[in-house]
Image (tube, rainbow, N blue to C red):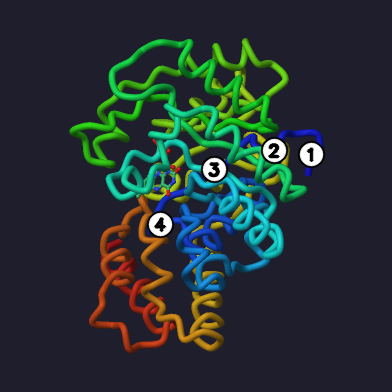
Amino acid sequence: MNQSLSPWRMSVAPMMDWTDRHCRYFHRLLSRHALLYTEMVTTGALLHGDVARHLRFNAEEYPLALQLGGSEPADLAHCARLGAQWGYDEINLNCGCPSERVRRGAFGACLMKEPALVADCVKAMVDAVDLPVTVKHRIGIDRAQSYAFVRDFVGTVADAGCRVFIVHARNAWLQGLSPKQNREVPPLRYEVVHQLKRDFPHLAIVVNGGISTLDQMAAQLQHLDGVMVGREAYHNPWFLAGWDAAFHGASAGASTRESVEADMVAYMEREAAAHGTPWYAIARHMLGLRNGLPGARPWRQVWSDHRLKLLPAREVQALAHGAVRKAA
Ligand SMILES: Cc1cc2nc3c(=O)[nH]c(=O)nc-3n(C[C@H](O)[C@H](O)[C@H](O)COP(=O)(O)O)c2cc1C
């Protein structure tokens, strides 16, 4: 492993309902060095809900960052402390999510309009834990194109002790777009992120949004400290298997898709025995594993067939292999 590389050089984005601990275990089999993020966990969920359910993870997932959603400095400090106690490597604050639910709770992307409040939140977390406290945000709100807006946001939050900014390179339109549209419709403007790095060379600046090839990652790494990938990593997970060799000077993360599938079946068996987790709660994250190979579709159909849900994972695997052979 090359110790001199930034820990933020390559990462998989926080994605609600997707990057749960099972998904992260799977992604770790594909890349040993990618930094993995949890789904966003709100301060409310940790203050009033089942902490273990939200924070539990497998030791294999390291390096691992906890993303928090909230806007109350004391609550965020408390939750950051919980994250440190549970063993996370980093606490990340979500200032980029435009969803309705998040907006009503006054956190997510709308926080970009209140840099002083974000600075208070960051300061409270920095004071509470010895871990890096990082912020994920957009380049603007609604239609405003002013670079000064995002520059001042980063400057203010950096003054409070944040050294790492993960920038989704498009605006968040708080009116009229669904969260999904907000990841597709506002145009990507990578040059804004590059300008941030030029203006704040001492900060780690990580770009996110619309990146789906090794070449695109390499091109961004010419300018920036890191690249975060969301949807492409989830839908085409074999993409991750090229990351360690391409960007970490390490041998490839995983040898074959079959070996990853076999490791996942062993994990499904352990999870079923230890926690009663059904195989399909885990398998749903690996359905794209064979994308691009012959038989990918029948393989995926078997692994997503809920009529098989009473079968042990190993038998489902055998059926999936049979389906691939039949399609060949
Ligand atoms: C299903 C889904 C859930 C997401 N949930 C979160 C989240 O919890 N926190 C967050 O900061 N971003 C969330 N995002 C946004 C991603 O982290 C990322 O910023 C976005 O998808 C753009 O990157 P990409 O083009 O590489 O996918 C989510 C995206 C998707 C597709």
The residue wearing badge 3 is 93
Q: Residue at x 26, y 67 (%)?
A: 301
Indicate the position of residue 52 as horizontal and vertical percent values: 56, 73
Compute the Cα span from label 2 to label 1. 6 Å
The residue wearing badge 4 is 18
Q: Which of the marked residues, 3 or 1, is nearer the chain's N terminus?
A: 1
Q: How many marks?
A: 4
Do the CB atoms of the residues marked 4 and 1 lie less than 8 Å apart?
Answer: no
The circle on residue 70 is: none
Question: Which class describes the residues within 10 Å of circle 4: few (<14), some (14-19), or many (20+)?
Answer: some
Quadrant where the N terminus sits is top right
Indicate the position of residue 118 as horizontal and vertical percent values: 54, 34
Q: Dividing the image into four equal quarters, which quarter contains ligand 1?
A: top left
Q: Residue at x 21, y 35 (%)?
A: 177
The circle on residue 248 is: 2
Query: Under 8 Å from ligand 1: the CB of mark 4?
Result: yes
Q: Does residue 269 lie above or below 136 as drawn?
A: below
The circle on residue 2 is: 1
Indicate the position of residue 284 as horizontal and vertical percent values: 36, 65
Disc 3 versus disc 1: nearer the observer: 3
Compute the Cα span from label 2 to label 4. 25 Å
Q: Does residue 139 lie above or below 325 as drawn?
A: above
